[in-house]
Image: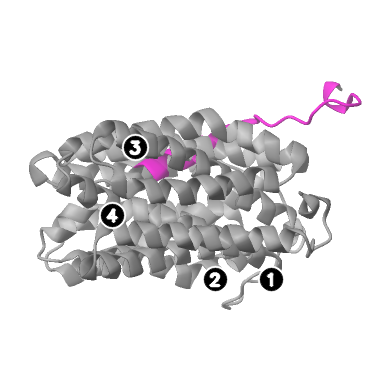
Amino acid sequence: MAAGRAGERPRLWTAAYVRLDLVSFAFFTGFYLYTSTFQFFVLDRGADVADLGLVLAVLTLTAVGVRPLIGPLLDAAGRRPVLLTGLAAMAAASLLYLVSGPLWQVVLIRMLQGVGWSMSTTAASTFIADVVPPSRQGEAMGFYSNFTDLAMAVGPFLGVYLSRGDRFAPLFWAGGAWPLAALLLAAGLRERRRPGGGRWRIRFRLEPRALWPAGVLFAVTFAYAAVLGYLPPFLRGRGLGPGYADFYVAYAAVLLLTRGLWGRLYDARGRAWALVPGLVLVAGSMLWLPAVHRLPGLLLFAVLFGLGFGAAQPATLAWTVERVPSAVRGQAIGTYYTAFDGGMAVAYAGIGAVIAHSSYPVGFTLTSAVVGLALAAFLAAGRRAPDGSAKEEDR
């Protein structure tokens, strides 16, 4: 009835969309608990900064290996069973940290966590894309990202609080509880029947139409990993101590206030209107980070990086979704998250090695250069309109 009136926008906030947003908030909170404190758990085991980079990279390297398998599995078996399995794996990994011993055991548990993370994030994003109107994909991904952004504020702040005095058991109990809560919420989801499903065959395949946005995303998440992995020890070394938890609150607040605006701008004007300023802000903020010595400078970095990442990340996801038919959407989003994890893995290991042999400022400056290269490539390719779509003509 009302939905059919001419000119009326299709409904976005359905029960399924809201439930998926809450599921994502819960398991992202469980994951982000570790971003502010897990580094110190590893360093307490005798690792140096280069070793830390490798341990951090294990999760994302594992995800890179399994995501191209998960995409076809989503299209064949369905979103819900993959999501539930991933959430169970994330909860199990968090609880296993409680009984871990030597560093090699931590690495194995980190691999299990990577499998669960890749299954959960790919399934949730694909599920979201299924239940929202195509004409509101950019806006939907922006609001969906708001829930993960809120998790980015809650998770690291709780992580600092729970691991006070370098006591990590409360952190790991909480890390298991959040994905279990997400699993209970996700159990009530139902999914639509989709065309193009079938038997799942084990194959490592990337969706070619998703490679261009995935390449831009790789650079964005390279910077994201530099912040997640190395901001806490960098700031502790500069005497900011537990106060660095304020960064996550400010960063998430910026994302919450601007994601929806970026999404609507994407839908109305095209991807370049979100991606170009997003990439500029990410690159510029990474150049500013080495100058941070006190809380005001850190909060300025949070604003700049939050604005940039909040524009670029959901824009690349919406760009991926609009380039492929629904029958291969799971595979395309698997490709997208392969780039997400790949950028993080390379940054964790590479920036860790740079810091170990040079300094934190050199590592952060290198990160800015990587994002700058992605911006230059996007601007050059945009003039050629490689896929002929209307939104490639953003200039």
Q: Which residue is mark 1?
A: 208
Q: Is residue 3 found inside the magenta-colored segment of the image?
A: yes
For label 1, the SS is helix
For the residue carrying disc 3, how many other residues have a C-alpha within 10 Å: few (<14), some (14-19), or many (20+)? Answer: many
Give the residues in magenta: 2-29
Return the mark for residue 248: 3
Position of residue 86 measured from the top left corner of the image (x, y, whole percent) = 44, 56
The Cα–Cα distance between marks 4 and 2, rounded to whole angstroms, is 30 Å
**Circle 1: residue type:** Pro
Earlier residue among tags 3 and 2: 2
**Distance between the alpha carbons at the discs numbered 1 and 2:** 15 Å
Numbered marks: total: 4
Q: Amino acid at mark 4?
A: Tyr
Q: Where, by quadrant of the figure, is residue 134 drawn?
A: top right
Residue on which disc 4 sits = 230
Amino acid type, mark 2: Leu
In this rendering, the label closer to the viewer, 4 or 2: 4
The location of residue 198, given as percent across then percent down, is 70, 68
Q: Amino acid at mark 3?
A: Tyr
The nearer-to-camera label among 1 and 4 is 4
* 1 or 2: tag closer to the N-terminus: 2
